[in-house]
Every structure is written in structure tokens, then in C-alpha cells.
């Protein structure tokens, strides 16, 4: 079973979550996982103005994904930060280049799953994941979320991301909050859950 974790991360929060998702996938026997990022659409100048250059440097070793590679995987787990309650433009641009895959039914029957990050607790994590699912459904993918068997999403003893739609983290208004242990556990649970389902279908 081949899984791909493909993400965009401007300041490193989604990247940290993506690593945890990949760790979860690896826990399932017989699964192979690769971590890739979608192409950047912003200039270095703009990234500099957004204070993202150091974080971008830290993920520059991660291979950049091309859309035609997607067909090679049985499961694809997408990670994208929230932008105005939706996925970021970099991920949207990447997905908008998958028309040929769509016309060939290349992703039909594959497992798809989404995780996200937002600055604030109620800043649109659920709307980002649910609106992302629409694209996956147009591709005929089988959508997998983060079931309530991941008990960490039920807690009210701490501020935390994660919902039945997928793992998530809260970056904070200034981006200084990195994913908590609970959020990383949710990400890893989601990776494991996707891999277990995909292994039953494709293993
Ligand atoms: C243009 C723009 C729009 C954003 N919109 C939202 C939003 O609607 N809600 C929110 O909570 N955070 C919003 N954010 C904050 C990002 O979601 C946050 O920087 C991101 O989750 C951090 O993840 P990353 O480090 O992986 O990029 C926005 C950031 C930018 C630059």
C-alpha cells in the first residue's frame, strides 16, 4: 500500500503535522509513505514580507510534488493551512492542475483525507477540511476523516484542534504556537487510520 502525504506549509505548522501523519502511516504493516510539498506560488519577495523565509528554508529538502505523481498512490493525505476558511491558494492551484487526472478517472477509488491548521481556534478549520472534501469527491476518492475513537478530540481540558473531519492545529495569532502533543497524536492517528483502511483495499 502506497501512501502520500502532500502539503503546503508557510510557517511550519502543517509540516510538523504532516510528519506526524506520516509516522502514523508507517505504523501499519506493509505500508510505504512519502512526504511531498506542493509548489510555491508566491515570490521570495512576498514570502520575505510575510516573514516566512526561515520556515521555507527548513522545508526546502522536502521534494516538490507534481500532479501526475498522484496516480501512483493508493492513499493521499492532504495538509493545507486555512486561508479565510478555505484551503490555501498554493494547494488550490495544485489541485486545479489535476484536470487531466480527473478526465482519466485516475484517482477514482483511492483513499483521500485532509488535515489543516489555522491561527485561531474557530478560524475555519472545519470549513477548510469540508470544502476540501468537495474536490476529493469530484475525483471519486473515498474520504476518511478522524473518527471519535481518537479520544483526544473530545477533551475540553485544554485548547486543541482536531475534529471528526480531520486533524488540525492552532498556530496562534502570531504563529508562535506549534502543534501540541494532542494535535500531533490526532495527526498520527489519522495517518494510521487512513493506512489501515487503504491496506484493506489495496494491501
Ligand atoms: C491570507 C491569510 C489568510 C488566513 N486566513 C485565516 C483564517 O481564515 N482563519 C485563521 O484562523 N487563520 C488564518 N490564517 C492563518 C493561517 O491559517 C496560519 O498562518 C497557518 O495555519 C499556519 O500554518 P503553516 O505554518 O503550516 O502555514 C490566514 C493566513 C493568511 C496569510
Image (spheres, grey):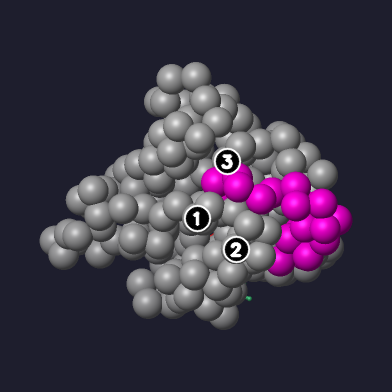
Q: Are marks 2 and 1 in contact (CB under 8 Å)?
A: yes
- Disc 2 element: helix
Kindly tell me whether mark 3's CB lies below 8 Å from ligand 1. no
Query: What is the C-alpha distance between the residues marked 1 and 3?
Result: 10 Å
Q: Are marks 2 and 3 in contact (CB under 8 Å)?
A: no
Please report the residue visible at 60 percent of the width from the left and 45 percent of the height from the top: 110
The residue positioned 53% from the left and 78% from the top of the image is 85
Q: Answer above or below: position of 108 versus 96.
A: above
The residue depicted at 43 percent of the width and 38 percent of the height is 197
Q: Position of residue 113 (x, y in %)?
A: 51, 52
Quadrant holding the N terminus? top right
Distance CA(mark 2)–CA(mark 3): 14 Å
The residue positioned farthest toward the left in the image shown:
157
Which of labels 2 and 3 is toward the front? 2
Residue shown at 50% from the left, 66% from the top: 129
Could you say where residue 150 lies in the image, as x and y percent from the top left? 26, 48
Residue 42 shown in magenta: no
Measured Cα–Cα span from mark 2 to mark 1: 8 Å
Where ligand 1 lies, by image quadrant?
Answer: bottom right
Q: Between disc 2 and disc 1, whose residue precedes?
A: 2
For mark 3, what is the residue?
75
Horizontal placement of 11 versus 152: left or right?
right
Q: Which residue is mark 1?
A: 143
Q: Which residues are magenta?
A: 92-112
User: Considering the numbered disc 1 on the image, is that residue within a helix, a strand or a loop?
Assistant: strand
Q: Does residue 81 appear to the left or right of 164 in the view shown?
A: right
| Residue that badge 2 annotates | 137
- Asked if the residue under mark 3 is in contact with the one under mark 1, i.e. CB atoms within 8 Å, the reply is no
Amino acid at each position: 500500500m502506497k501512501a502520500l502525504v502532500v502539503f503546503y506549509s508557510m510557517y511550519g505548522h502543517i509540516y510538523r503535522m504532516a510528519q506526524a501523519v506520516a509516522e502514523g502511516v508507517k505504523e501499519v504493516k506493509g505500508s510505504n509513505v512519502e512526504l511531498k510539498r506542493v509548489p510555491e506560488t508566491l515570490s521570495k519577495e512576498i514570502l520575505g514580507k510575510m516573514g516566512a523565509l526561515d520556515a521555507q528554508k527548513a522545508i526546502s529538502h522536502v521534494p516538490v510534488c507534481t500532479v501526475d505523481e498522484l496516480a501512483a498512490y493508493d492513499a493521499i493525505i492532504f495538509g493545507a493551512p486555512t486561508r479565510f476558511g478555505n484551503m490555501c491558494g498554493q494547494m488550490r492551484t495544485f489541485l486545479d492542475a489535476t484536470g487531466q487526472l480527473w478526465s482519466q478517472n485516475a484517482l477514482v477509488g483511492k483513499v483521500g483525507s485532509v488535515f489543516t491548521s489555522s491561527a485561531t481556534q474557530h478560524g475555519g478549520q472545519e470549513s477548510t477540511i469540508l470544502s476540501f472534501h468537495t474536490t476529493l469527491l469530484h475525483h471519486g476518492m473515498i474520504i476518511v476523516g478522524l473518527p471519535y475513537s481518537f479520544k483526544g478530540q473530545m477533551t475540553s481540558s485544554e485548547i486543541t484542534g482536531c475534529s471528526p473531519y480531520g486533524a488540525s492545529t492552532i498556530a496562534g495569532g502570531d504563529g508562535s504556537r506549534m502543534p501540541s502533543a494532542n494535535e500531533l497524536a490526532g495527526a498520527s492517528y489519522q495517518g494510521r487510520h487512513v493506512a489501515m483502511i487503504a491496506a484493506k483495499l489495496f494491501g
